[in-house]
């Protein structure tokens, strides 16, 4: 079956990982901007954005995978407001690139005032730089949001949802995907009308078993599964392992197709830059 991975940091992966993902059925990847393991200079971000928009699409294409990305200053580097101002000033030129789906992964790391301020600046940028896209409508670029790690996750998720509400009608929750949800945050996200992303890590966040539990408890609507493979202990095939766990429990092909392909296709297709369409069972 075909798979779209909505959140995978391929700059940290090898070409062998691309090949393994292609063999396992991955046909498209969405790569949010994130932390490189060290704090970059503003010039370093420009080079990184070029890597996301120029280099990774070519690497992915060698294996028949479509590569899309997001542009932002990751919340781990949001404490320095001066640097944030410089980086945000460079973002509009990259938001217009043909494989960029929107602003992300923005959010919170330690729930600090500076992180919150930079989050709000990103959201405003998503509004201000959106000129409307032919045939799709919308009030702002798509937004992909990182929620903090476990000890700060519930508080941070609540803060994020409240900050989005502060923008009022300028923000459409159906154009927002809040990622790394777990048992104590998924309900908050779905009740806010946003899309929810479940990240599958070998030693943290959700396991395949917990993710399928959440699918069964909260339904498959506006729900995506991703591997978020990065520099740390992670595995780009965790999305596929979650599909296999759902299949083992007897979930129908229709449900698997919805969660692992059609849901991300539906969310991403709000941008005309995304070139894949939803599929029927007969086409898989």
Image (cartoon, rainbow, N blue to C red):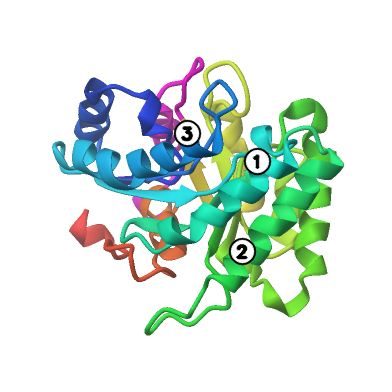
Q: Element at badge 3? A: helix
C-beta proximity under 8 Å, tags 1 and 2: no
Counting every numbered tag in the picture gives 3
Circle 2 or circle 3, nearest the eye: 3
> In the image, residue 10 lies at what x, y percent?
36, 32
Residue 237 belongs to magenta span: yes
Q: Element at badge 1? A: helix
Q: Which of the pair 109/190 is nearer the observer?
A: 109
Q: Badge 2, how many Cα within 10 Å: few under 14, some, many 20+? A: some
> In the image, residue 6 lies at what x, y percent?
44, 46
State left or right for residue 144 relative to residue 230.
Answer: right
Q: Which of the pair 114/138 is nearer the observer?
A: 114
Query: Which numbered disc covers residue 125?
Result: 2
> In the image, residue 215 lies at what x, y percent?
58, 45
Q: Which of the pair 214/176 is nearer the observer?
A: 176
Query: Which numbered disc covers residue 52?
Result: none
**Residue carrying label 1:** 83
> In the image, residue 59 lies at what x, y percent?
21, 36
Answer yes or no: is residue 134 visible: yes
As drawn, 167 above or below 233: below
The residues colored magenta run 229-254
C-beta proximity under 8 Å, tags 2 and 3: no
Label located before the other in sequence (3 or 1): 3
* Disc 1 from disc 2: Cα separation: 16 Å
* Disc 2 from disc 3: Cα separation: 20 Å
Question: Which image quadrant for residue 100?
Answer: bottom left
**Residue carrying label 3:** 44
Quadrant in which the N terminus is drawn: top left
Q: Residue at x 62, y 21 (%)?
A: 204
As drawn, 53 above or below 279: above
């Amino acid at each position: 079956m075909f798979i779209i991975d909505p959140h995978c940091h391929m700059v940290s992966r090898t070409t062998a990982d691309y090949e393994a993902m292609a063999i396992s059925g991955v046909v498209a990847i969405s790569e949010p901007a994130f932390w490189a393991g060290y704090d970059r200079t503003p010039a370093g971000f420009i080079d990184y954005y070029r890597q996301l928009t120029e280099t990774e699409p070519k690497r992915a294409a060698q294996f028949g995978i479509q590569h899309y990305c997001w542009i932002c200053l990751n919340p781990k580097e949001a404490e320095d407001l001066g640097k944030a101002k410089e980086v945000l000033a460079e973002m509009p030129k990259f938001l217009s690139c043909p494989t960029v789906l929107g602003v992300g992964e923005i959010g919170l790391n330690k729930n600090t005032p500076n992180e919150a301020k930079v989050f709000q600046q990103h959201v405003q940028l998503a509004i201000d730089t959106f000129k409307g896209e032919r045939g799709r409508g919308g009030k702002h670029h798509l937004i992909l949001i990182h929620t903090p790690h476990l000890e700060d996750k519930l508080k941070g998720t609540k803060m994020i949802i409240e900050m989005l509400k502060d923008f009022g009608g300028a923000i459409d929750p159906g154009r927002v995907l809040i990622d790394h949800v777990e048992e104590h945050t998924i309900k908050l996200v779905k009740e806010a009308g946003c899309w929810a992303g479940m990240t599958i890590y070998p030693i943290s966040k959700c396991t395949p078993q917990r993710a399928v539990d959440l699918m069964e408890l909260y339904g498959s609507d506006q729900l995506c599964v991703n591997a978020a493979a990065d520099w740390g202990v992670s595995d780009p095939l965790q999305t596929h392992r979650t599909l296999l766990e759902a299949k083992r429990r007897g979930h129908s092909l229709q449900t698997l197709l919805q969660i692992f392909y059609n849901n991300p296709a539906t969310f991403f297709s709000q941008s005309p830059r995304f070139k894949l369409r939803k599929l029927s069972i007969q086409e898989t």
